Image (spheres, rainbow, N blue to C red):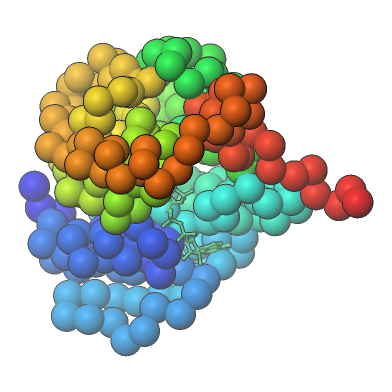
Amino acid sequence: THCGRILLTGAAGGLGRVLRERLTRYADVLRVSDIASLGEPRAGEEAIVCDLADAAAVDALVDGVDAIVHLGGVSVERPFEEVLPANIQGAYHLYEAARRHGVGRIVFASSNHVTGFYRQGEVIDAAAPPRPDSYYGLSKAFGEQLARFYFDRYGIESVCLRIGSSFPEPKDRRMLSTWLGYDDLEQLVRRAMFVPKVGCTIVFGVSANRDCWWDNAHAAHLGYAPTQSSEPWRERIEREQPPLREDDPVRVYQGGAFVAAGPFGDS
Ligand code: NAI
């Protein structure tokens, strides 16, 4: 469980800041990158500001790395014109650079919004057809297909983490089902990076919550065994947040509010 040089994109973001702390122990050098300011590089780090939409800059960013954890991009629903350069072109630039520089493995931060139009309570696994709930979800579905293509065509391995809701604690009723604690996030990334053969694996990033909509049987080879649960927050959330109407899309669909975000540009 050690690697020469790991590239972490999106390192200035919420999960990037968490993994920036936690991944240093798995690498000689952690190369952190973001379009936003990263501050001074810390011990064992290289810090490079880079726009994923800039192909030449991404190519230089990937030069010399052994593995990539790709978190960078637009992380909420936005107009397609904003999602396209950061998430779609950005993921393409990253995989192309990985191919050119011989990087063997990428951990891709995908999202539950790839399958956000399944109903809450319905249990799906990685074989369920994508039902993206947003332009954002579409971009993550593209990223997963890109990962598949670069494995089939070039043998570059990927683990696509369909992250549920990864925050310090669950914030609402939906997150009682979708929450991914940071220890479990770290475990997933560690396994995704170091389990010997992963091919192109999709795994739902979710803690051991009481009610879960996702079955990770297809990712059993990762050996992921979550140790956290949303249960300690249930009582407070259910007390403070009355249930939504039964037909509210936020309550009906796994993607929650994303299924109803936008359209943009209409008045
Ligand atoms: P975040 O929005 O806090 O971090 C994303 C980072 O990407 C930001 O620091 C941003 O500056 C950077 N970025 C945006 N556009 C860029 C560009 N063109 N070039 C370079 N960097 C750019 O999001 P968060 O929560 O840390 O999520 C990390 C990843 O995990 C994202 O890919 C997100 O879509 C995914 N994810 C996160 C979930 C969560 O619950 N936090 C749930 C599902 C997926």
Residue at horizontal 17%, vertical 75%?
Answer: 44
In the image, is 86 to the left or to the right of 35?
A: right
Residue under the image location 20 percent in, 19 percent down? 220
Query: In this orientation, which residue lies closer to the viewer: 184 or 246?
Result: 246
Q: Name the image quarter holding residue 106.
A: top left
x then y, percent, for residue 213: 38, 20
Q: How many marks?
A: 0
The x and y percentages for residue 227 are: 12, 37
Viewer-proximal residue, 174 or 92?
174
* Residue 187 percent across, percent down from the top left: 17, 43
Q: Is residue 21 above or below residue 150?
A: below
| Residue 166 visible in the current orientation | no
Q: Is residue 107 above or below residue 14?
A: above
Quick check: 113 left or right of 224?
A: right
43 and 246: which is toward the camera: 246
Q: Is residue 253 visible?
A: yes
Position of 107 with respect to 250 (left or right) is left
Residue depicted at 52% across the width and 71% down the height: 35
Between 243 and 177, the residue placed more toward the observer is 243
The percent position of residue 177, horizontal first and vertical second, equals: 35, 31
Outermost residue to the right: 267
Q: Residue farthest to the bottom?
A: 40
Q: Residue at x 29, y 38 (%)?
A: 234
Is residue 125 depicted above or below 93 in this figure? Answer: above
